[in-house]
Structures are given as C-alpha cells and as structure tokens.
Amino acid sequence: MGVIIEQTDAVFKTASVLNTASVSVYNRRRQLMQKVIPLEPSKYYHIYDRGNNRENIFFEERNYHYFMKLYAKYIEPVAETFAYCLMRNHFHLLVRIKTHKTDAVFKTASVSETASVLTAREVSHEFNNLLNSYAKSINKAYQRTGALFQSHFGRIEVTSDRYFLALINYIHRNPQKHKFVDDFRDYPYSSYHAILSTKPTHVKREEVLEWFGNKMRFEEFHQSSTDTKPIEFLIEDDGD
C-alpha cells in the first residue's frame, strides 16, 4: 500500500464503478463472511461487530473504557490499530495483523527469538477472547444472560489505498451517520481525536497521518469527503 493521497475526495471518484459492481462484490463479500476468512499476518482488515438482535453492547461510560482495556490486553499483542469507533450497539476497527505476537517487553524493542510467530487461528482466537471476556463481564455486571454479540465478528480485508482512506473516514463519521451526535468530531469514543492529539496513544498515529499527508489534510478529508456510499455496500448493515 502507498502513503500518498491524491486529493481529499479522490477516494470517491470510482463511486459509479463501485456501485455498478456492487451486487457481485456484495455477493462475494457474503461468501467470504460465511467462510469466516482468516486474519493473516501483515494484512489489513476492517473488523466489526454489533449487539445480538441489534441490542446495546455499551450501557454507560465505564463500559467503553473497560472494552479498550481488554482490547489492549488481547489485541495489541497481535494487531496494530489504525482507527476505531465504539458505539452503543456496534463497533468498527481498522487493524493490521502483526507477524509476531508481542508483549510489553517487545513493544519498544525489535522482535526477538522469544516472540512467537502468529497464525491466523491464533489471531482470530484473540479477537474472540476479547469479545467473550467483555460479554461475560457485561452479563455479570448487569445481571443479563445470553449472547451479547451476534455470532461471528465481521472481517473484510482492506486491499487498496482508496479503501483504506475511505474506511478511516467511514469509521470516524459513523456516530454522525447513526445520529448518535450531530457532529462526529464531538464523539468521544473514536480514534479521531487521538490521531490529531499529541498525547500518547496506541493508535498508529504517525502512519495514519503519513497516509493523508499531514494533520491538515487528514482534517480536510474528513470535512469534505462525506459520501461513504462507495464502500457501504461492502459492510453488513450495522445500524440501529
């Protein structure tokens, strides 16, 4: 994948082509979803899931923070995060799978002989651990029973620069799309402000900004590129 964005709305210049091909691509996506595609090392994926029967998965502020705490425990050792957004009944992630599993020792050091080579099965297992651990905690805290999430978390490989850029925009604008806020920039549970901030973050801030060029172009892209329809047909309906 490259690192240069041509213009702020270049992602959407192929909208007519994408829409024409949407049926065949959508069918292909459904086939991949049914097969539960593997999460392979060094590849980028859009990961998403929603509450069972569209029910809420986050009930109060502390739930969002607890989810991210578990995310750090289970996912940071196996994947790098480029964007995320947590909403009351679903979430979206953009990640790149690592080649080796790391821990606190290896986060600031080169991969050593003791860092285990990751397999697709192990990566999927860690995502399942995240969701299962969170679900058990929520069920216990709110005295509920049954599944919290729908059966399988969604995963779609991100295979082009344009999809990568459009997906970051889609993820950050999702709270506004679903009318959780009037302006996505006011939403507190996404990576948008973490990318613009100078505070420590586990999001790959420098790499994201490099893709867009700089902070100003990152902001301009989110302001001007409001049409997410070219990629929405790739994503299973995640609405209320």
Image (cartoon, helix red, strand yellow):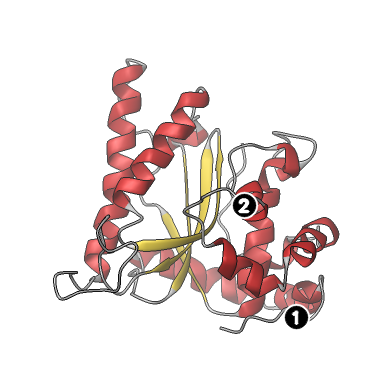
Q: Quarter-wise, where is residue 2 in the image?
A: bottom right
- How far apart marks 1 and 2 lie (CA) works out to 39 Å
Residue 162 image point, x, y percent: 67, 76
The extreme left residue here reads: 114
Residue 143: tell me if it is visible: yes
Residue at point 57% right, 59% down? 235
Q: Circle 2 is placed at which residue position?
A: 198
Residue at point 24% right, 59% down? 105
The extreme top residue here reads: 143
Q: Nearer the viewer, residue 69 or 159?
A: 69
Residue 3 image point, x, y percent: 63, 80
Q: Quarter-wise, where is residue 104 in the image?
A: bottom left
- The quarter of the image holding the C terminus is top right
Neighbor class of circle 1 (other Cα within 10 Å; few <14, some 14-19, many 20+) is few
Residue at point 58% right, 39% down? 189
Left or right of 8, for residue 195? left
Residue 22: tell me if it is visible: no
| Kind of residue sitting beneath label 1 | Val
Q: Nearer the viewer, residue 207 or 5?
A: 207
Question: Dot 1: what SS?
Answer: helix
| Kind of residue sitting beneath label 2 | Thr
Q: Is residue 89 above or below residue 236?
A: above
Label for residue 131? none
Question: Dot 2: what SS?
Answer: loop
Query: Of label 1 and label 2, which has the lower sequence position?
Result: 1
Residue 117 image point, x, y percent: 20, 74
Q: Is residue 192 above or below residue 224?
A: above
Left or right of 107, for residue 200? right
Residue 207 image point, x, y percent: 57, 70
Q: Circle 1 is placed at which residue position?
A: 17
Q: Nearer the viewer, residue 134 or 26?
A: 134
